[in-house]
Image (cartoon, rainbow, N blue to C red):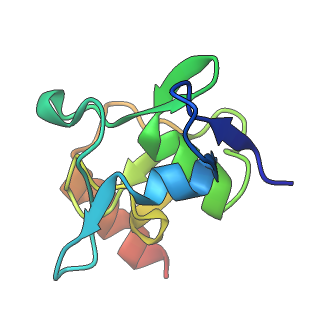
Amino acid sequence: MKTLYVNPRNGPKVSEEERFTAKYIITRNGCWLWVGGGAKRFEPRFWVSPVMVPAIRWSYAHYIGDIPIGENIYQTCDNKLCVNPDHFCSMKPIYPMLTDEEIRNRKLEAI
């Protein structure tokens, strides 16, 4: 079921997915570079009424499915503004914390 967003200025109703796709551009390496809210602070944010949510979590939940309980979402491309779900992996937190590069290498070894 699509959730429709009603523009408060009497604009057309658009789905969350349409609003989301309007807020990124696709780069040559396949990253979906977020240009919406929070981009200047490297914290992609997306408005899902009535709250702002991390755009990365919204992208994962929308395109892949529920985020497993107790797991975090990591980007395998090292681009903090990337919201491409193909560049995400979910893993349990690892302590001591690994760098994104170490996580990416660990994911590749598991394949």
Let me know if residue 91 appears in the view: no
Q: Quadrant of residue 49?
A: top right
Locate residue 111, reporting x and y percent: 49, 82
Give left or right: position of 22 versus 79: right
Locate residue 88, reporting x and y percent: 44, 60
Q: Residue at x 87, y 54 (%)?
A: 1
Give left or right: position of 103 versus 54: left
Instruction: Residue at the far top: name it.
Output: 50
Instruction: Residue at the far right: name it.
Output: 1
Locate residue 19, reporting x and y percent: 50, 50
Q: Residue at x 57, y 18 (%)?
A: 51
Locate residue 110, reporting x and y percent: 48, 75
Give left or right: position of 9 versus 5: left
Give left or right: position of 84 versus 89: left
Task: Give whichever of 92, 65 is nearer the camera.
Answer: 65
Q: Residue at x 52, y 41 (%)?
A: 57
Count of all numbered marks drawn on residues in the image: 0
Let me know if residue 55 appears in the view: yes
* Vertical arrangement, residue 84 with respect to residue 72, above or below: below
Task: Give whichever of 69, 39 is nearer the camera.
Answer: 39
Task: Give whichever of 72, 13 is nearer the camera.
Answer: 13
Q: Residue at x 48, y 35 (%)?
A: 93
